Image (cartoon, coloured by chain):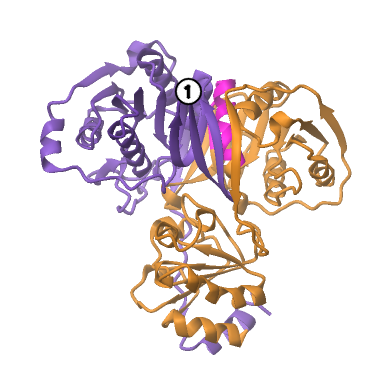
Amino acid sequence: MKVLVPIKRVIDYNVKVRVKSDNSNVDLANVKMAINPFCEIAVEEAVRLKEAGTATEVIVISIGDKNCQEQLRTALALGADRAIQIETDQNLDALNIAKLLQKIVEEEQPQLVILGKQSIDSDNNQTGQMLAALTGLAQGTFASEVKVEGEKVNITREVDGGLQTVSLNLPAIVTTDLRLNEPRYASLPNIMKAKRKPLEVKSAADFGIDLTARTILLKVTPPREREAGIIVESIDELVEKLKNEAKVIS
Amino acid sequence: MSILVYAEHDNSVLKADTLKTVAAAQKIGGDITILVVGHNCQTVAEKAAKVNGITKVVVADSAAYEHQLAENVSLLVSELAADYSVVMATALTTGKNFMPRVAALLDVAQISDIIAVESADTFVRPIYAGNAIATVQSLDAKKVITVRSTGFNPVACDGSAGITSLDNVINAGISSHVSDELTVSERPDLGVASVVISGGRGMQNGDNFKLFDGIADKLGAAIGASRAAVDAGFVPNDMQVGQTGKIVAPDLYIAVGISGAIQHLAGMKDSKVIVAINKDPEAPIFQVADYGIVADLFEALPELENAL
C-alpha cells in the first residue's frame, strides 16, 4: 500500500524565536529551519511500515516556496521514495493546506496518510483532521501506535486520561504524537542517494482552489516575561515564603 | 449572536474546563447553548443545565456517541452549527480531535487554543510554544474556536437552564472504539488542581515519583512530569505537562529535577507561583521560578514533606 506523508518546514525546535520589533510576526531571517518534529515522526513511521513490508511506497509532500525542497530531500534521505512540492509563496491557513492535500490524496489514492499532529510554529493541530473531513476518511489522531490489520488499522491514541485504541477503515488519516517512534538519522550514503530520488514540483495555483486567507494576523507580541525570583537557602525558608509571602499554601 | 459550546465530559462528569469555555463564550457575547454528546450522559446534561449564563442545554444521547468518535461527532456538530454563528469547544483531547473536522465540513478556518477574546471576531492565541502571542482576526461568517481553559475563569454553577434532547443519530460507520487504558488516580486532574508537583529526568526512575505522594497528599496536589520523564518511561504520557502535553496554570507549581526546556515552560509558565528544586544552579527553570532551591531532590523532597 501507498503511504503519503505531508511535512512542514519550520523553525528548528532548539532555536528560541524572537518577535520582530514592529510586532508583525516572529523574525525568521537567518534562523535554522528543519522538518517539524512531529512530521519527522510521521516520515519514520511510514518508512518503518515499508521496511516491515506493509507499505510499498512512501511519498512525502510539502507545500511552500522552493526552500521546503530541503526538508523534502531530508525526508527522502530518511527513506521516502519520492517527493512532491506544491509551490506557493503564500502563507496558507490549515484549511487551504488540507484542500491542496485532498487533491493529492485523490490523485495518489494512498491507503494511509500520516501527518504530524501539530507544527511547532503555529501550534494549530488542525491539518490532519481537516484532511480527514474533506476526504471523508476516518482519523486516528495523536497516535502512539499504528497497527495495520487487513482492511483496517488500529490506532492507539494519547488522550487526556491515558490511552485509547480505535479501529479505522482504510484508507485512513493518522496524526503522530511524540512517542510513536524515535526517528533515525540520515546516513551520508542515504543523503547522497536522496539527491537522485524524484521530486516533482506542482504549482498551488494549478489546482483551481480558492486559497484566499480566512484569517488575518493582526499582530504578534512577546509573551509576558516572568521575572526570576529568589533562591532560598533551605526548605524551611521555602515553606515560610509560600505560606506568608506568596500565600499559596496554608 | 448565538453560540454553541461543546461540553467536555466522560459520560458521567462534566469537566470543569467547560465552565471556562462558557466564560470565553460570554466574552464574545450572545445566547449560549451547551451541547452534550455521549451515551447515558444525563447526569452531565443536568450538571450543564446549572451552568450560569446559558440559554439551554441540548443532549444527543446515543450508543453511536459513547466514545465521542470524531467521525460521528463532527457530522452531528456541523449539522447543528447551521443555527449558530459560533461553535466552541475546550482545547482538550476531545475538542482537539473533532473540531478541525467540523471547521472543514463548514468550510471555515478554525481558531485554535484562544487565551483571550478581543472582540467577536478577534482572538489572542499563543504560537511557537507560547514564545509569541498572536492576535488573529477571523474573516469567516461562522467561527469555529477551541479554548485554552487556562486563559479564562470558570463561570458559576447555580443556574437552571432547560434541557432538550436530540434524536438524530449520525453514525459515519468508518471507525469504532476498541479499548481504553485510562490511568486511575485518587488525585485531582492536572487541569483543575490548584497545586501541581512535577518531576523531570532528575527523578531517575518511576519509583522515585513515590517521593511526591506525601507532599501531594498534604497539598491536595496533582502530579505531573516533563517530557523527558515520560519519554524515559518513568511515568505514563497523560502526566506530561508542556507544549504538546497538558497546559496547566495552578496557584502553585513545583518543578522537581526539571531543567526547564521551552517546551515544558510552555505548559506551566502561567502558573501563579513557581517553585524549582534542582541541583544545577544554572538550570533554566530558575529563570522563571519565583522561589528556587539548589538542592539534591532526594534530600529536599522528604524535608519538604515533613515541613508541610
Q: Which residue is at a point 70% across and 45% down the rendered structure image? A: B10
Taking the image as drawn, is residue A80 in sight? yes
Give the mark count.
1
Check if residue B96 falls in the magenta segment: yes
The image quadrant of residue A9 is top left
In-image side of A205 versus A230 (left or right): left
Chain A, hue in figure: purple
Chain B, hue in figure: orange
Q: Is residue A11 above or below residue B270?
A: above
- Which structural element holds mark 1? loop
Residue of label 1: A151
B174 and B264: which is toward the camera:
B174
The x and y percentages for residue A63 are 33, 26
In-image side of A120 versus A239 (left or right): left
The x and y percentages for residue A64 are 30, 28
**Quadrant housing the N terminus of chain B:** top right
Q: Is residue A184 above or below residue B203?
A: above
